[in-house]
Amino acid sequence: MTTLCIVLALLLVVCIIDRARRERHWLRRWESVAKNIGLRARDAEQLPEQALALYRARQLAEEQAGQRRVFETLLDEISQGLVLVDEHLRVRYANQPLKKILLHADSRPGRPLIEAVRDHQIIDLVQQAITEKRHTTRRIQVLPSDVGAGTNLSGRHFLIESAPLPATSGGGAWLMIQDVTEAAMTEQIRKDFVANASHELRTPLTIINGYIEMLQDDAAPNAATMKKCLDVMEKHGKRIARIIEDMLTISRLDAAASNGLNLEPFNVRVCAQDAADHLAPMMEGREVKIEFNFPKDGGKLKGDRFYWDQVFTNLIENSVKENAKPGLVVRVSGEWQKDHCVIKVSDNGIGIPAHDLPFVFKRFYRGNKHHSSQIKGTGLGLSIVKRAVEAHGGKIELTSTPGSETTFTMRVPLQHTEA
């Protein structure tokens, strides 16, 4: 055992001596190289430590770059646009959503912020945050005069926030931009709906109350006067009932968007025919012809039959009401393709003026501004049609040539509706 220990000790000594010899050898080689390149011995001794420090600094820089990439990836996933600017309002960093919100804005680092956002309202907010050193929030609407060349932001609404950055972070400020156009439009639609509904209900109620007062003041109204008053009151009472029914239909459609439709297979041609039969009393005494062009089986959809009844009833009724002259032909057709069906309702009537086309699907909008003794409608019919088609995953388009033809074209995907 003693001999083994002695051998091991000798081997250890030999290894130590060999390592020291190797270190002296490489040290002499390093001193020789350092001398040949003009380094002093002291500098040569410090060079390995400096190289190690550089290596560690490089590792730290790579770790920081990796963390930066992670943070940038996370910031690219949020829905808001984020910009960091220096004290001179030059871009230091901008995430990807900013380009989508501002339609591919030029937000490269070093660019002036005004070239990225192109709106002085935003620039003023950031400048205010830097000057007053506080968090600032504002809601703005981009107007046509505020829009820079090559952009299409007119009418959009933005929620913008800005706050100064600490001096340890380089100063300047951060800016966050959120597109709230959809929420603003929804709120405006709600306000318009309430205002228009109140107006539409107030008019017939005022007329009914006026005739009631007239009857009350007339102690012994004759039969003709009584009949006239009752007829007018009945007409406007039906108008109120129709407005309320249409409002309830829109409310149910909005609820169906979140709770789902009552989807069942139904025959589309039969649905359109039922709508036309329902409107038969309205077409009595008028030269109106309704033509149907569907596949032999009538065409099948899996959808909410209640709302498709509303679609065909409103479109056919709209054609009949707006075309009082004889000779009207309403064509209802359906064509089934591989992944969708195309349903059209067209007529050869007076058509719709071009300036009215963008607005016909708005709630309570009526293109004919001339009021007459005939009640035109609630102005909700076409908005119900559009909402019902969209609830089934489809789209509706309107084309019209005044004096020639008006066509409503509905494209409904079959993957969601077919039996």
Image (spheres, helix red, strand yellow):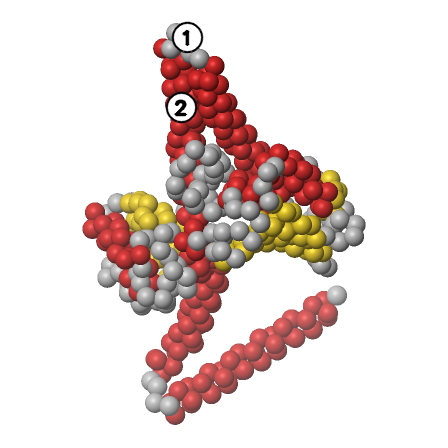
Is 325 or 98 nearer to us in this picture? Answer: 325
Residue 232: image location, x then y, percent = 46, 24
Report which residue position mark 1 lands on.
220
Residue that protrudes farthest toward the bottom in the picture: 36
Q: Is residue 234 visible?
A: yes
> The residue under label 1 is which amino acid type?
Ala
Q: Is residue 337 above or below residue 377?
A: below
Q: Secondary structure at mark 2?
A: helix
Residue in the foreground of this view, choosing between 304 and 99: 304
* Local secondary structure at mark 1: loop
Q: In the shown orientation, is residue 418 left or right of residue 102?
A: right
Question: Which sits in the foreground, 315 or 337?
Answer: 315
Please provide percent x and percent y for residue 16. Answer: 57, 75
Looking at the picture, how far across and down is residue 81, in whole percent?
40, 55
Depth check, front residue: 290 or 393: 290
| Crowding at mark 1 (Cα within 10 Å: few <14, some 14-19, many 20+) | few
Total numbered labels placed on residues in the image: 2
Mark before the other along the chain sequence, 2 or 1: 2
Q: Which mark is residue 207?
A: 2
For image coordinates 33% across by 45% down, the residue present is: 139
